[in-house]
Amino acid sequence: MTPPTTQWLSAAELSRMLVVGPERLLAYASRGDLPCKWNQQGKPLFDADYAATLFRGRGVALEATSPHFLGVLGSTRLGRAMPEAPASLAESATPRELRALRRRAA
């Protein structure tokens, strides 16, 4: 079984395909959040498949599945959003009730 081949693209090429600019691509790569390598001319090349998991494609509508939609990065960094507390718990919830609500959300 052969390993999958990675398509390495320049920032300009990715910016035409995805809703992201070259500066943001470099920022993600410098933090280690996006695989990057340098070509012989000293220009960065980015893993196109991985970048597509982080950024929306041009012309693709953003679909929020709930009012708590965080996007791919928000979900990765913050975890899933906890659902709204029922109105009866909103003002006078005990710590035990809040823990139970968090467990049900997980």
Image (cartoon, rainbow, N blue to C red):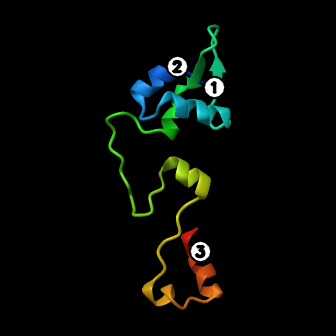
Question: In the picture shown, does residue 79 fall above or below 86?
Answer: above
Question: In the picture shown, does residue 38 fall above or below 69?
Answer: above
Callout 1 environment at 10 Å: few (<14), some (14 to 19), or many (20+)? many
Label 2, secondary structure: give it: strand
Asked whether, in this view, residue 52 is left or right of residue 40, the answer is left
Whichever of callouts 1 and 2 sits on the residue coming sooner in the sequence is: 2
Residue receiving disc 1: 36
Label 1, secondary structure: give it: strand
**Marks 3 and 2, how far apart at CA:** 42 Å
Question: Is residue 44 in sight in this rendering?
Answer: yes
| Quadrant placement of the N terminus | top right
Residue in the image at 36% along x and 47% along y: 62
Residue 30 location (% of width, % of height): 66, 33
Asked whether, in this view, residue 77 is left or right of residue 49, the answer is right
Q: Nearer the viewer, mark 3 or mark 1?
A: 1
Callout 3 environment at 10 Å: few (<14), some (14 to 19), or many (20+)? some
Residue 36 location (% of width, % of height): 63, 25
Question: Is residue 5 in sight in this rendering?
Answer: no
Q: Nearer the viewer, residue 80 or 103?
A: 80
**Marks 1 and 2, how far apart at CA:** 10 Å
Residue in the image at 52% along x and 20% along y: 9
Whichever of callouts 3 and 2 sits on the residue coming sooner in the sequence is: 2
Whichever of callouts 3 and 1 sits on the residue coming sooner in the sequence is: 1
* Residue type at the position of mark 2: Ser
Residue 77 location (% of width, % of height): 61, 52
Question: In the picture shown, does residue 99 fall above or below 8?
Answer: below
Label 3, secondary structure: give it: helix
Query: Contact, CB < 8 Å: mark 1 with mark 2?
Result: no
* Residue type at the position of mark 1: Cys
Residue receiving disc 2: 10
Residue receiving disc 3: 102
